[in-house]
Image (spheres, rainbow, N blue to C red):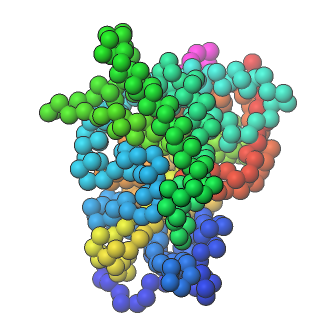
Amino acid sequence: MAATTAVIPGPAGNPLVGSLFELTRRPLRTYLAARRDHGDVVRFVVGPPGLRMEFYGVFSPEGVHQVLGSEAANFRKENNFYDELRSSVGNGLLTSQDTDYQRQRRLIQPLFTRRRVDGYADALAQEAQALAERWRAVPGGVVDASEEMSRFALRAVARILFGADVDEAVEVINRSFPVLGEYIMERGFAPVRLPRTWPTPGNRRGAEAQRALYGICDRIIAERAERATRGGGDEDADDLLTLLGRARGDDGEQLDADELRDQVLVFLLAGHETTATSLAFALHLLAKHPEQRKLAQEEARAVLAGRAPTAADLERLPYLTRVLKEAMRLFPAAALIGRRAVEETVIDGHVIPAGAQLVVAPLVTQRHPGHWPDPERFDPDRFLPEEEKARHRYAWFPFGGGPRACIGQHFSMLESVLTLGVLLRDFDVEVVDRRVALAQGITLRAASAMRVRVTAVD
């Protein structure tokens, strides 16, 4: 498409601070309105004079393809948010770039093959069954889906990572990650960032949470290394931390202790918050839509009757898979993805200058009326095979795309579908809170109660 010389459109905002207040207080609504009012490439201005910055929202699937796929080398993970994320959880697979990223991906990819991930199905099924047993004892049967799925997903990913050390790790992580996440968001989007070394209350809270997380990971890693040195019997261990420690490249390269910790922290962050969001909203949506809930329950009860799920059941639960995909369309955990343009480029006919900050937004593109008829409606059959085949590859991208696509896609889908299957097999689900407020942290989350009533079935 030929480039236009016209100024890229965007919201006028406040004369003094531009769109700062809107993006701070209601970012998701602001991005959706910007696409509706101004098109698929939108210019935002934020901040007061002297600290003002511009960035661009790219909302069409074609534009997203350029940023994440065909021209990915021109769009880097470089902005204040990624700076703060690296400083807080290290230079792991989510935050690293260039040769660091290529080396890490090369070492870690073999641990996320479909066959390897399927080996975790039994552990995931046990955690799902434990959750179901706990729900049976809840007085009145009312649970907050957001809180429950967050707790469940953290325990599940920590068990896969740490194996026998899961209980101690979960206690520290559950206490420290929310504090560190809030700290990352505050600093990542602040107009002015004070040095981390200054003894402000926020810096002290963030540093304490980081020390706790680093401490538990470093201690477990050191104990594993010591046992391995002594021949302590970990030869058959298959938790992900042990496998990461054993990973070797063709030339014998491996991850050192700091790199192991960075990968563990990234997997904990990405592996529990994203899955928790998908499961919570899937339950909430099914609770609100009895016709789709009935179809999902019938499938779960027919396939999983009287037994624990296995990895093979993922292919036997196509409707539940479509439910999860539709939940991720409407409420993608990674609702916003930031990049920086290295060189000037043209997207959808608009010139994006070198050095510009960009945002691609699954939450916006996945509700684009040009690609999703009646986009606010919950309809799992949008993900029938023929429907998926007919759509643009980047009309749906909750796991990102291109060379930086999420390495844990299959793990997330396996965990989500099997867990949803167990819960729908064992419970009827009814909505309590029909309307749920949203908040954008490191991931999308519910900002209000997301209660459902669960009733055990025989």
Q: Which residue is drawn at the image coordinates 36% and 18% (left, top)? A: 226
Which residue ends up furthest to the right in the rendered image?
Answer: 140
Left or right? Give the position of 84 relative to 18.
Answer: left
Q: Magenta stretch: residue 391 in it?
A: no
Q: Residue furthest left?
A: 251
Q: Which residue: 42% across, 51% down?
A: 86
Predominant SS along the magenta part: loop
Q: Is residue 313 visible?
A: no
Left/right placement of residue 239 relative to residue 105 reads right
Question: Residue 8, image x and y in percent?
Answer: 44, 84
| Vertical relation: 84 (above or below) 190 | above
Residue 106 in the image: state x and y as whole percent: 25, 39
Quadrant in the picture for the C terminus: top right
149 versus 122 height, above or below: below
Q: Residue at x 34, y 33 (%)?
A: 257
Query: Which residue is depicted at the point 57% across and 43% down?
Result: 208
Give the image quarter of residue 127.
Answer: top right
Left or right placement of residue 282 versus residue 321 in this view? right
Compared with 258, 435 (above or below) is below
Which of the 4 quarters of the picture holds residue 238?
top left
Q: Which residues are magenta?
A: 304-311
Image quarter in which the N terminus is found: bottom left
| Marker count (numbered) | 0
Q: Is residue 37 above or below residue 313?
A: below
Q: How far across and down, in percent of the image, does residue 227 sit?
A: 37, 15
Front residue of 55 and 298? 55
Question: Residue 100: percent from the left, percent from the top?
Answer: 27, 48
Q: Nearer the viewer, residue 267 or 88?
A: 88
Query: Is any part of residue 41 visible from this angle?
Result: yes
